[in-house]
Image: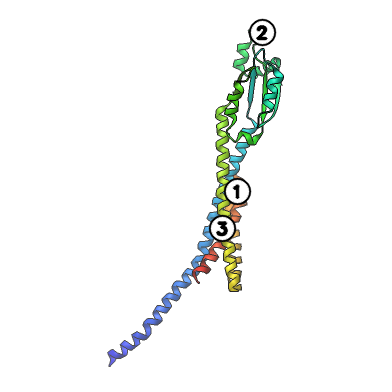
Amino acid sequence: MPTQAIKERLETLIPQIRRRQITSTGGGTARSFPAGALFLALAAGVAFSLADHARGLVTKFLDREVAGFKFDVFLTESADRPFVEERLLTTPGVRSVRFVPKEEALGRAQDHPALAESLKWVVRNPLPESFDVDWVPGFLLTGSVSAVAETWAELPGVLSTAYDPVRAERMVLLSRIAKEWDVVFSVLFWAGVTVCFLGVGRLVRRASARSLKTLMVSAGWGAVAGAAGAGVVAVWVGTWAGAGVMAGILVGALGSIGRDVSNG
């Protein structure tokens, strides 16, 4: 008889213990989820702020390379200057050309000690006349400068062309990196925004005001965490990037939507 009573008592206690375990686990998960979402938003803020800073560095360096790009077309003694100038100006990608006489070329040579020393003992100015070519910045990034230089070198009256081919290739590479960076940012941002809109639409159809409020609160905390991540990067590199805040908002909102979907 006591054995039967113990058995009945255990049959009553076991479901209660299981329910308490489930409740305890769920409560732990509920408490740990916001902390995990905040950590992810903080990490996203740091990562996107650093990426935005690196993107800015690439852009600044590219702008400096474009602004400092020099291209000279040297002329022969018997060159038909108007003819050559017209051919240069009618080439796609050329913004303007400027004629450089021998005297100006000699004056420029004084800025280069080795060249100035070699010209010190000459009686006659040996430097040729030339044209300085100013390019449209966008054309420099297409990688077509070398092909144009080869074409111009075959023109009557053109002695040679002079430019830095390594710098031209570097500009093309930097431009490609910047464009790929833009694509990555755009895909991640619009993918996150699309999922957020779908999640909000789902909550509206369900008329779940409580879940919408939770979503807004989560996005707000995500913004705070993202701003904190951006602040860490700003202290480190000295540049504030708003991309970190946007990343934090999206992570917070997506976390709330994902949790709502998992709970049915």
**What amino acid is found at the position of numbered circle 3 in the picture?**
Gly
Q: CA distance from mark 2 to mark 1?
A: 58 Å
Count the labels in the image. 3
How many residues crowd around disc 2 within 10 Å: few (fewer than 14), some, or many (20 or more)?
few
Label 2 to label 3: alpha-carbon separation: 69 Å
Label for residue 234?
A: 1
- Res 225 seen here: no
Can residue 208 be seen in this snapshot?
yes
To which residue does mark 2 refer? 124
Q: Is residue 103 left or right of residue 115?
A: right
**Residue in view at x 56 percent, y 48 percent:** 183
| Callouts 2 and 1 close, C-beta under 8 Å | no
Could you say where residue 38 lies in the image, as x and y percent from the top left? 54, 61
Secondary element at image label 2: loop
Quarter of image, res 20: bottom left
CA–CA distance in space, label 3 to label 1 = 24 Å
Comparing 107 with 227, the one in front is 107
Check residue 30 in the rendering and tell me which mark sits there, or answer none. Answer: none
246 left or right of 262 in image: right
From the image, tell me which residue sits under label 3: 192
Image position, residue 185 (x, y; %): 57, 50
Foreground pick, 259 / 217: 259
Residue depicted at 57% across the width and 65% down the height: 199
Query: Please, is residue 254 above or below residue 10 in the view?
Result: above
Up-down relation of residue 207 to residue 250 (above or below): below
- For marks 3 and 1, the one nearer the N-term is 3
- The answer to whether 234 appears left or right of 2 in the picture is right
